[in-house]
Amino acid sequence: MRILAIHSDFIEIEPRERAIKEAEEIELGKKKIEECVVVFCAIEEKDEKGIENSAFEEISSICSQLKCNKIVLYPFVHLTSKPASPEKALEILKELENKLKNSGFNVFRAPFGWYKAFTIKCKGHPLAELSREIKAEKEEKKKIEKKYLILTPEGKLYKPEEYVFKEGEEALKILVEKEVFGKGEETGKEPEYIKHMKRFGIEWEEMSDLGHMHFGAFGNILFELIAEYSNMLAHSLEIPVYNLRGTNMFNLAEKPVREHAELFGDRLYQIDTGKRKLVMRYAACHQQFAILKDWIISYKHLPFGAFEVADAYRFEQSGELLLCFRCRKLHMPDLHVLCKNMEEAKEWFFRLHKKIYEEMKKLGRDYVSIYNIYYEEGAEKFIEENIDFLKKLVEYEGKPALLCLYPKEVKYYWVLNIEYHIIDKMNRPREIGTVQIDIGNAKRFGIKYADKDGKEKYPIILHTAIIGTIERYLYTVFDTALRKEKPTLPLWLSPVQVRLCPVNDSLLDFCEEIADVLEKENIRVDIDDRSESVARKIRDAESFWVPLIVVVGEKEKGSGKLAVRIRETGEVKEMSIEELISYVKERTKDYPFKPLPLPRRLSLRPVF
C-alpha cells in the first residue's frame, strides 16, 4: 500500500461520475472537511489481508505527530502502477476505516470508484506532506491442523493410531503411514518406468520451463487414445454431457476467478502482462463455469454434465517434479455434473465413485482412498449427518478408507473430496482419480437454475476426473505393466498391436497383404522389413513391448495360418487372419482406435 498524507486546512470533495462498474452507491453532492489529515491511499496487487494493520499503525503515528484526530481516507489509485482489484482495494480500505474509527479517530472516507473534483489547502509546515510505502508484517503460514479417522465398511470409526491392520490391508497401511504419520518418504532413486516411457517418446521438454513434457509420435498416440477414452467415459453416463472448450488463462481481477484461485492454494501458475495479472487454469473449472453462468437452466435440464480435456497448470516445486505424475503442465479430463440438490448430488457422486473404481479394476489395479471432509459446522458434524452415505461408499470399496477432517477456518468450496490412490511399484501412495461435492462455486460464479416454482437456485456441482489426468493414467498404465513378468500395455493402448516379421524380402508383398486386411479392421500393424535376422526382429519387437508378433515364412504363406507370439503369456498360437482379428477385437471392444502414427514399414521411419 502507498499513502500520501497531507495535513490540511480543508479538503472539499465532489463526486462527478462513476469510474468503474464496482463504484460504491452514494448520494451525490459536495463534502467539505476542515482541519484534517488527508490520506491518499493506493492498494496494490501484492497487498494481502492484514496490510490494514500496518497502515493503521503508520497513519496513527502520523496523526499523533500532527496532533490531529480527523482523517480523510481518499482512494487514489494513481500512486501505484500495479493496483489491486477494486473488490480487494475496497475491502482493505473499509477495514482500515473501521480500525481507525474503533480507535477513536473521526474518519471520513471519500467515495470509492468515482471521478471526483477536489480542492485542498495544505498547511505547508515541514510535516504537512508525508509519503509512505506500507508493508504488512509477514505472518507465518499456519499449519492446517487436520484430524484423521479410519472408517470400516461396517461403519465403525477408529483413530489411526488405534487401528489394527488386517491381512490384505497393506495398501491402507502404507497410505496411513504416509498421510498421518509422515513415513515412507521418497527414496531418491529414479523410478524404473521413466526409461521405458522415454522409449515411447514421453520425456521432459528441456527447452521449456521445468515440469513440461513432450510426446513423440508413439507417445502422442497413447495421449490421444486416453483423451478420447476419457471423453467416451463421460458420455457413457446416463445424462446429457456437453463438451466445452476455451482459454487457459483468466484475469485475477475478476472476483470469482480470484476467490476460486485463493481457495486452490499457493501453486498457481501466473502471468503478468504488465496490464493484467493472469492465472493459468489448474483445471477446467474456470472456463466451464464462465460459460455455464450465462446459460438459462431449468430444473428439468438437471442433472447434466460439462466436459473438457483441459490443459492445466500447477507451479509444482522443482524438487517434487516427477515425469507423468507431478508436472507443471498436465491435461485434466474434467467433468462437472450439475445437480438440483444434495440428495441428487449424493446419488450421482456414488455413481461416479463406482465408475472410478471400475476403470481402475480394468487395468487390474485397486485403489485405496482418502475421504477429505470440510464442513462449516465442523467435519465431525458432516460425518454424523452423513454416516450412512459414507458407509455406502466404503462398503462398495470393500475395505476401510482414511477420513481426513479439515478445520472450519480453511474455507473450502467442497464438503467431500475423495482422493483415489494406487500404491506404486516403489510402495508409494499416488493419487490418480478424484471426485468432489462442490457447494460454493455455483454461487461464486453466478450459475443458477429455475426450480419448478420458477425460483432461482444454485446447483450443487460434482467435480471429477474419472481416470485422473492423462499423465497420471499413463503413470498407472506403465506402473502396472512393470509389475508383469513381461511388461505389456493394454492392447487398445499399444502403439503397434501386431508386428509382422518376414523371414526374407520375398515375403514382403504377402506381409503387405496381411497388413491391408488388418488395417481395414482398425488394427495397428507394422512390418519389420529391415535387413536383420529374425531373432533380432523379435528381440526389437519385444523391447518395444509389441503385444502380438508374427513371424512370416513360406509355411505361413502356404497354410494361411500365422504363428502369433503373444507377449503377455509367452505363448505362440496358430491363428488364421480371421482368428487374429477376432482376438484383437475381443480385447479392444469399447475402447477408441487411432491409426498407426508412422509409416507401416520400419525402414521408412526416422530413427528415434
Image (cartoon, rainbow, N blue to C red):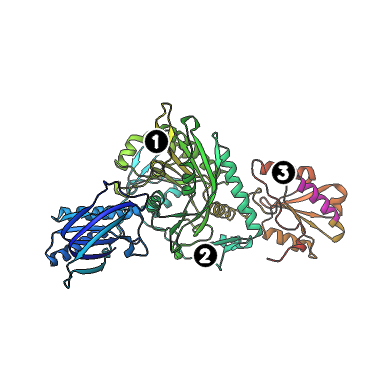
Q: Is residue 213 left or right of residue 406?
A: right
Mark 2 vs mark 3: which is more N-terminal?
A: 2
Magenta residues, as a range?
A: 509-520
Instruction: Give x and y (percent) for residue 429.
Output: 46, 53
Q: Secondary structure at mark 1?
A: loop
**Residue at the image position 46 percent from the left and 30 percent from the top:** 299
Mark 3 vs mark 1: which is more N-terminal?
A: 1
For disc 1, the marked residue is 154
Q: Is residue 374 left or right of residue 131?
A: right
**Residue 519 lies in magenta, yes or no?**
yes
For disc 2, the marked residue is 190
Instruction: Give x and y (percent) for residue 457.
Output: 40, 34
> At label 3, which amino acid type do we have?
Tyr
> At label 1, which amino acid type do we have?
Glu
> In front: mark 1 or mark 2?
2
Decide which of 45, 25 is in the foreground and name it: 25
Residue 192 seen from this side: no
Disc 3 crowd rating (10 Å Cα; few below 14, some 14-19, many 20+) is few
Asked if disc 3 and disc 1 are in contact, CB closer than 8 Å, the reply is no
**Residue at the image position 37 percent from the left and 53 percent from the top:** 262
**Residue at the image position 16 percent from the left and 53 percent from the top:** 102
User: In the rendered view of the protein, which quadrant contains the C terminus?
Assistant: bottom right
Decide which of 83, 501 is in the foreground and name it: 83
For disc 3, the marked residue is 583
